[in-house]
Image (cartoon, rainbow, N blue to C red):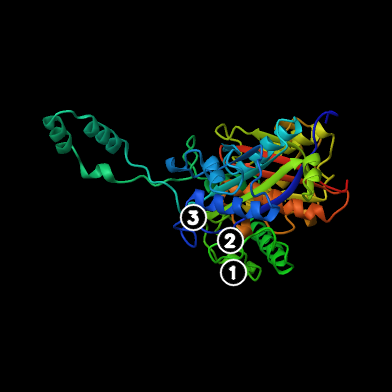
């Protein structure tokens, strides 16, 4: 970092409880979820009336009604109404990428303080009308004479109004993320028993975190919900083993137990320059150090969710660090198999040589340092909100440690991945 760059700090975070889609938040939209989250963060940090340099965020499942979503949410809060808002999207890495964009602005002196955020609700997913129906409606609207209008009306067919339901299938392959992860699990020979054991650890870590009160100041009560809906620390491997495969019904190993559920929720983090935080008596929980995005050629046969291996490799080389140099690892758990594939790839000489361009392997990490407070398998995964959830949780862990470093990664749709380095304030 050059001497004229500002240091970037995390000063606070907030999120809704994460809940199952089409349930508790079924009647809410992205704007409702994100506005409530921003309001809570603003209240927590006493930002009422403050002018921030930017609020950056977005959603993956986005309706046309979400035009200028972040700016509209800002205007529904008590921030100074001249605070700008910016919509971005990098699939499941959206709020992580939003934090990176904001952090880079702060480093360069283009901003002193702002909020990065994300929201998603499958419950509020828009339905698409058919192309034939769309063309018919425009033709009817453009008809000038009574005869032309009558002809348009007579050309209507009932099948026009059959809606198209949104999917999370990859446009290039037609396969869902789960289908792609099944292919990865087969390629890397990831056993179902290992996937279930990994998922159970996530639930137990999340359960212990809730018991100790870790999430009490990170998650605010919303719509009568006080905590994430999915945490099941009392589950067992026997219960998990009884579930049928969710994607490959015959030879699959991915199930509802070792895959993230469809989730609704929102999350936000406030970042600032170190000088701004000190001047305004804001807490300094952790520092944002560096980040990297990457992509893989999944259309050409690479694993869809393997891009974090590449992003981490580039990030480590630039910072002259080893994979083992971290005290905390937060790897987004889209699927247990996806995390296990990533960990295995880092130890594979051929993969590290062919895909990462390394002479040796990145090696193993200490699994006792991984996803210590539970992660997406237990907490849920509202696509665009997960990155901010991760930063907030890791920041709190770093705030109680001296000279500690954390590595965060998230895989995304489109064969992309994001990695981020954070460190404790005491370093």
Foreground disc of the pair 3, 1: 1
Residue 204, horizontal then vertical, whole percent:
69, 65
Judged left or right of residue 60, residue 159 is left
Q: CA distance from mark 2 to mark 1?
A: 9 Å
Of label 3 and label 2, which has the lower sequence position? 3
Q: CA distance from mark 3 to mark 1?
A: 18 Å
- Number of marks in the rendered image: 3
Q: Going 60% across and 62% down the picture, which residue do you hit? A: 228
Residue 29, horizontal then vertical, whole percent:
47, 51
Mark 1 element type: helix
Write down the residue under mark 3.
249
Quarter of the image where the N terminus is located: top right
Of label 2 and label 1, which has the lower sequence position? 1
- Graded by Cα atoms within 10 Å as few (under 14), some (14 to 19) or many (20 or more), the crowding at tag 2 reads many
Residue 269, horizontal then vertical, whole percent:
67, 48
When the figure is inspected, residue 73 is found, relative to residue 195, above or below; the finding is: above
Of all residues shown, which one is farthest toward the left? 147
Of label 3 and label 1, which has the lower sequence position? 1
Write down the residue under mark 2.
257
200 and 58: which is toward the camera: 58
Q: Going 17% across and 34% down the picture, which residue do you hit? A: 152
Write down the residue under mark 1.
239
Q: CA distance from mark 3 to mark 2?
A: 15 Å
66 and 124: which is toward the camera: 66
Mark 3 element type: loop
Asked if disc 2 and disc 1 are in contact, CB closer than 8 Å, the reply is: yes
């Amino acid at each position: 970092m050059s001497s004229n760059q500002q240091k970037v700090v995390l000063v606070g975070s907030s999120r809704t409880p994460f809940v199952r889609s089409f349930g508790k938040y079924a009647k809410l939209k992205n704007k409702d979820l994100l506005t409530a989250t921003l309001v809570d963060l603003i209240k927590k940090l006493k930002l009422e009336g403050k002018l921030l340099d930017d609020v950056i965020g977005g959603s993956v499942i986005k309706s046309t009604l979400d035009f200028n979503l972040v700016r509209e949410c800002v205007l529904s809060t008590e921030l100074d109404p001249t605070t700008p808002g910016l919509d971005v999207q990098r699939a499941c890495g959206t709020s992580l990428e939003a934090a990176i964009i904001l952090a880079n602005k702060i480093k360069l002196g283009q901003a002193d303080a702002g909020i990065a955020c994300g929201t998603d609700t499958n419950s509020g997913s828009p339905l698409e009308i058919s192309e034939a129906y769309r063309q018919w409606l425009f033709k009817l609207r453009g008809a000038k004479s009574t005869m032309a209008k009558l002809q348009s009306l007579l050309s209507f067919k009932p099948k026009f109004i059959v809606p198209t339901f949104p999917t999370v299938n990859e446009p290039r392959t037609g396969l869902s993320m789960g289908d792609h992860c099944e292919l990865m699990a087969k390629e890397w020979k990831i056993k179902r028993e290992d996937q279930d054991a990994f998922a159970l650890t996530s639930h137990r870590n999340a359960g212990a975190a809730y018991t100790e009160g870790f999430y009490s100041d990170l998650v605010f009560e919303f719509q009568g919900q006080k905590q994430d809906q999915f945490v099941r620390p009392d589950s067992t491997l026997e219960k998990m083993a009884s579930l049928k495969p969710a994607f490959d019904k015959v030879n699959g190993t991915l199930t509802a137990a070792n895959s993230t559920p469809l989730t609704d929720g929102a999350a936000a983090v406030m970042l600032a320059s170190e000088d701004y935080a000190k001047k305004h008596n804001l807490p300094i929980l952790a520092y944002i150090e560096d980040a990297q995005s990457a992509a893989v050629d999944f259309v050409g046969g690479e694993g869809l969710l393997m891009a974090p291996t590449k992003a981490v490799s580039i990030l480590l080389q630039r910072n002259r660090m080893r994979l083992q140099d971290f005290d905390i690892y937060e790897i987004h758990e889209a699927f247990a198999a996806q995390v296990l594939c990533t960990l295995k790839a880092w130890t594979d000489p051929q993969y590290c040589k062919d895909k990462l361009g390394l002479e040796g392997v990145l090696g193993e990490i200490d699994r006792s340092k991984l996803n210590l407070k539970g992660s997406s398998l237990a907490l849920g995964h509202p696509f665009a909100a997960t990155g901010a959830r991760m930063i907030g949780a890791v920041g709190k862990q770093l705030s109680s440690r001296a000279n500690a470093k954390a590595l965060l990664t998230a895989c995304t749709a489109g064969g992309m991945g994001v990695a981020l380095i954070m460190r404790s304030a005491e370093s």
